[in-house]
Amino acid sequence: MIRSVLLLEPKSGDYEGLLGYFKSARVLERSLDTPGCLSAEIQAPVTRRGPVLVTALWASAEAYELWVGD
């Protein structure tokens, strides 16, 4: 198993815009629809300062590469 880790700094501090994009584009749901994706989550600081953390757990490197290629 591998875990992908992505740190995102919202442009101009627009946390709601970033989180709204993830929701409207169904990013986490689409990743979970990818064979081999075991879990995915997004974590935003309640203070709205600092990066947003997006992680996913993948059954294999091949499963992750399938997602990256989508």
Image: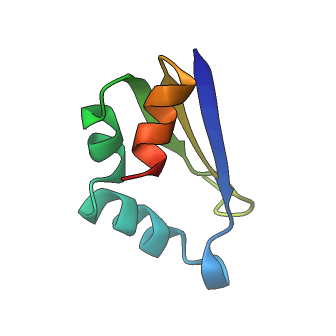
Give x and y (percent) for residue 56: 51, 32
Q: Residue at x 27, y 54 (%)?
A: 26
Give x and y (percent) for residue 67: 41, 43
| Observer-nearest of 17 and 40 | 40
Residue 3: quadrant of the picture: top right
Q: Residue at x 42, y 25 (%)?
A: 39
Is 8 positioned to the left or the right of 21 in the image?
right
Tell me which colouring the rendered structure shows: rainbow
Position of residue 12 relative to residue 48, above or below, is below
Q: Residue furthest bottom?
A: 12
Q: Residue at x 64, y 49 (%)?
A: 6
Residue 8: quadrant of the picture: bottom right
Position of residue 1 relative to residue 63, above or below, is above
Give x and y (percent) for residue 19: 43, 62
Give x and y (percent) for residue 2: 61, 22
The N terminus: image quadrant: top right
Is 22 positioned to the left or the right of 24 in the image?
right
Q: Residue at x 43, y 51 (%)?
A: 69
Q: How many marks?
A: 0
Residue 50: quadrant of the picture: bottom right
| Observer-nearest of 6 and 62 | 62
